[in-house]
Amino acid sequence: MITKLSIRGYKSIEDQEVSLDKINILIGGNGIGKTNFISVFELMRSLYDRNLQAYVLKKGGANRLLYMGKKKTQQIIIDLEFERGGFRNRFMVDLSESQDSLIISETKTAFFNKVWHYQKCDSNKVEASISSDKAGQAYYVSDLMRQFRVFHFHDAGDSSPMKGKSNIDDNITLSRDGSNIASYLFYLQERHPKAFKRIEMAVQSVSPFFAGFALAPDRLNPQVIQLEWKQHGVDDLYFNAYQLSDGTLRFICLATLLLQPNPPKTIIIDEPELGLHPMAINKLSAMIKKASEYSQIIVSTQSVSLVDNFEAEDILVVDMKEQASIFKRLKNEQLSVWLEDYSLGEVWEKNLIGGQPF
């Protein structure tokens, strides 16, 4: 589990140290820094995948990633602290601006045994070697970073990859954009029927018209599969993803992510409540809590209904102070008087804990 994340010089985050727990729900106004915090994990995953240069280019160059631009900031420094099985490890990276890209000035790993013991991995490189380093403490850090995935199921329009056909063998993990949802669900149906049934029942609980999935390889091309489903009262016709509402399609992906039998150790989701009915948001909250028994959950949200389902200690409030994002974890005892009369979401709405767009 990630216990601490220190960020310096990245986007709207000038210098912050954030302690993380099993459940971490980020709340705050638009443009405050929630998505920037989430995107740190995308940046770290690009390092692991040896894809840093492509990531920087895709994001518009280093100037867009550096706090207040390269005239103000020339370095991004990130320090991740992990704990697993009673052992503490760290991964540190120092990125420097060069010709509107980022180069790796240094990466280090560390383990704690009375004091921190450091090991240098990279110096003055364009891509990191952490994913291929199998020696010593780097191996443990690499294994944790390998499971960093930021999930975005926002695109549910007609051109959404979730609605198209996917290769039936693309079923090792659920993709970050849900593009292989059909093939992954088919794999669960065939190999993990109990987990598949739990997902199906979760969808049925928020979509009363939904009678279940109808998953099978394409009859003309058995190497591909498309998401198909059955409707109550219609026995002789199957429907595909184009006949699902955007919210239902997103909920199917969220239920699959959170109820799968072997979830990632770290699950990161940006605004999962998008397009969901309040009842579906309550169900989503219950699934997040259940998934937190096996995975660390990091979620950004604008939903009062979702916040109402969690304890104050689960909430990280994001605000802006002197043109920089700041992060604060709530505490129940500090809000106990207010929580006697109001829900946590109502306390947020009344601007008693911050996280507002003004």
Image: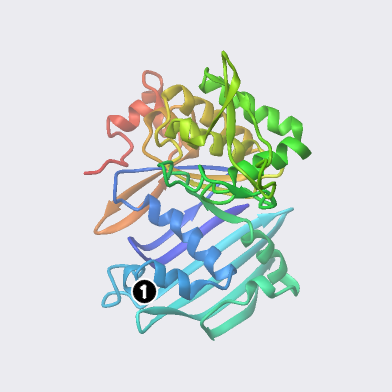
Q: Is residue 116 visible?
A: no
Residue 232, by quadrant, is: top right
Residue at the top extreme, as displayed: 233
Residue at the right extreme, as displayed: 191
Residue 275: x and y, percent?
40, 33
The quadrant in which the C terminus is found is: top left
The residue located at (30%, 30%) in the rendering is 349
167 w.r.t. 200: above or below: below
69 w.r.t. 186: above or below: below
Q: Which residue is mark 1?
A: 62
Q: Secondary structure at mark 1?
A: helix
Q: For the residue marked with disc 1, what is the amino acid?
A: Ala
Foreground: 108 or 176? Answer: 176
The residue located at (42%, 55%) in the rendering is 37
The residue located at (62%, 61%) in the rendering is 145
Mark 1 nearby-residue class (10 Å; few <14, some 14–19, many ≥20): many
Residue 223: x and y, percent?
68, 50
Q: Quick check: 171 left or right of 207?
A: right
Residue 52: x and y, percent?
50, 73
The residue located at (44%, 32%) in the rendering is 247
Foreground: 141 or 111? Answer: 141
